[in-house]
Image (spheres, helix red, strand yellow):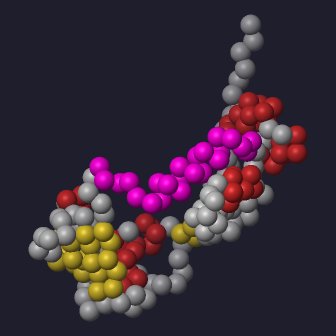
Amino acid sequence: MLWYAASRVGHKLHEKIDIHFLIAGHTKFPPDCGFGLIKQAYMKTRVNTLADIAEVVENSSPVSHLNIPQLVGMADGSVLVKTFDWQKHLTPHFRRLPQIKSYQHFSFDTKRPGVVLAKTHCDAEPIEYQLLRNGADLPPVDSLPVLAPPGLTIDRQAYLYEKIRPFCADEARDITCPAPKVTQKSPQKSMPKRMHL
């Protein structure tokens, strides 16, 4: 996350980025309320497909803007939100911040490309650390490596088909638990052998 923030500020896509983490053990905040409402609605709803989960999220809150579902992909394998291999893209250009877990506050500014100001707590003096391996060598903003969804292994497909399919609604069986098939996205593994008594 620090590398990504440093890259965006370095390319002047933002003038400044501040990242603040809560003190360990103090993680209760408004999104927990939203997740609680989703959990309550989920427990009372039959869910067979991704579309069903999206509907649960949509209807989970009396306030229309509190829980808004966003699917990243569809059951047919189509991708709605691309995933990028940020680790591969950023690693050659950045180095790790030593003792990163001891800091809670991080700041980046376009006036100091690649530099993070890190503080152990809000009133502490910040330490300055150059994250870039080469102070002027920012990663490119284009040609980002896209990660294709890996798909399900043949073993997982077989499990869903044999063990979960009977519990799905008839209209959802071929969507959520279709018959197993080997594709380029799903690594081939031998089918589990059955024991006969």
Q: Is residue 28 above or below residue 131?
A: above
Towards the viewer: 153 or 31? 31
Of all residues, the one furthest to the right in this rendering is: 171
For this orientation, the residue located farthest to the top is 197
Among the 4 quarters of the image, the one containing residue 4: bottom left
Residue found at x 57% / y 64%? 66
User: 81 or 151, which is in the foreground?
Assistant: 81
Question: Where residue 133 sits in the image (x, y, percent)?
Answer: 27, 77
Residue at 29% in and 86% down:
109
> Which residue, as the protein is rendered here, is positioned at the far left?
125
Quadrant where the C terminus sits is top right
Q: Would residue 144 be found to the left or right of residue 51 on screen?
A: left
- What segment is highlighted magenta in the picture? 25-47
State which quarter of the image contains the N terminus: bottom left
Residue ID at (53%, 57%): 34
On whether residue 148 falls in the magenta region, the answer is: no
Say if residue 185 shows up in the picture. Answer: no
Q: Position of residue 41 (x, y in %)?
A: 65, 47
Question: Any magenta on residue 30?
Answer: yes
Q: Is residue 136 left or right of residue 7?
A: left
Residue 83 spot, x, y in % from top left: 57, 67
Q: Is residue 9 left or right of residue 188?
A: left
